[in-house]
Image (tube, rainbow, N blue to C red):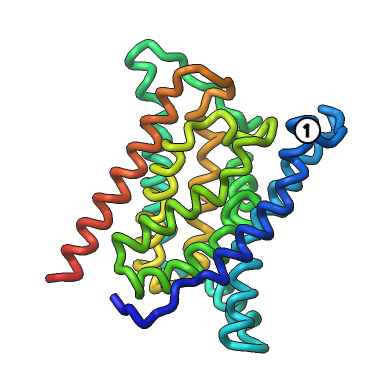
């Protein structure tokens, strides 16, 4: 840990401002504060949310420009074009995120719960859907979270506290989505979502490490995790109903992240 490392306030400030300002009109429309028809709101929700998701990228580019000046942003973005991740980084996240999703999706059947139907029209659409998730559906968040903020936080606080801090901040950055009609988050328990984000942070930190600190590993892994969500759904899209699949998913993800970090710390001390 290095106490001389500055906390990335600029990054978090711009990230939240960008995303929350863009998402605010959807919240106002959802609460009927501004007049928008349900049909128009349903059309606008996904693309507007996607634009807001580029907040972490905006935060990273702003912080880099302030810290390192002209040219730093181009160099930073070029670092994401190194796709030589290694077979472990390609394969292990499939088992981790696919395995946890499968357990959460399937295991409630053993206790009488119904299986939630796949939301993709065909299994053959998984790969193109994965590409969409990497670039538009969550993977792009990693331009900021793990690409910029994580190395700074781990240098300042160490692996444990850095990923807990980042996971909690990451969860609260999503908070406006709970107030937008039709968003998947509006059906989730926020406390459970914090578990999920902290678990993701531990896992993605480790994946970045074994990739040789290749920034694209975050985009790939986060996009993959999100791609499994409609493939093996763990969320009942109804409010005020039990969510056994969801709770298995988020707790299992957190436990996997903790176990990975325990073994990672042990290997670092040997």
Front in this rendered view, residue 17 or 229: 17
- Count the marks: 1
| Residue drawn at point x = 36 percent, y = 31 percent | 248
Q: How far from the left and from the top, in percent, is residue 61? A: 63, 74
Q: How far from the left and from the top, in percent, is residue 168? A: 43, 51
Front in this rendered view, residue 74 or 37: 37
| Left or right of residue 125, residue 203 in this image | left
Crowd class of label 1 (few under 14; some 14 to 19; many from 20; radius 10 Å): some
| Residue drawn at point x = 68 percent, y = 59 percent | 18
Find the residue positioned furthest to the front: 33
Where is residue 208, by image quadrant? bottom left
| Left or right of residue 110, residue 43 in this image | right
Quarter holding the N terminus is: bottom left
Residue 212 vertical placement versus 95 (above, below): below
Quarter holding the C terminus is: bottom left
> In this figure, which residue is indicated by the disc labeled 1?
42
């Amino acid at each position: 840990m290095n106490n001389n490392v500055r906390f990335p306030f600029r990054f978090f400030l711009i990230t939240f401002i960008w995303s929350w300002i863009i998402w605010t009109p959807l919240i106002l429309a959802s609460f009927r504060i501004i007049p928008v028809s349900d049909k128009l709101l349903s059309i606008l929700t996904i693309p507007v949310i996607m634009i807001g998701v580029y907040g972490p990228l905006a935060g990273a580019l702003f912080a880099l420009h302030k810290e390192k000046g002209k040219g730093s942003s181009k160099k930073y973005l070029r670092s994401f074009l190194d796709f030589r991740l290694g077979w472990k980084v390609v394969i292990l996240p499939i088992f981790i995120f696919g395995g946890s999703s499968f357990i959460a999706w399937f295991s409630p059947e053993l206790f009488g719960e119904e299986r939630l139907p796949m939301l993709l029209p065909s299994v053959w659409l998984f790969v193109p859907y994965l590409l969409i998730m990497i670039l538009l559906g969550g993977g792009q968040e990693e331009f900021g979270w793990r690409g910029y903020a994580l190395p700074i936080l781990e240098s300042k606080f160490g692996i444990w506290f850095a990923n807990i801090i980042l996971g909690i901040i990451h969860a609260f950055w999503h908070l406006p989505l709970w107030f937008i009609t039709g968003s998947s988050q509006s059906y989730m328990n926020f406390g459970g979502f914090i578990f999920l984000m902290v678990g993701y942070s531990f896992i993605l930190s480790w994946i970045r490490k074994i990739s040789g600190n290749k920034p694209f590993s975050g985009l790939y892994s986060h996009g993959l995790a999100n791609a499994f969500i409609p493939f093996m759904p763990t969320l009942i899209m109804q409010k005020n109903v039990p969510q056994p699949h969801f709770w298995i998913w988020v707790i299992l993800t957190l436990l996997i992240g903790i176990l990975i970090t325990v073994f990672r710390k042990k290997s670092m001390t040997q």
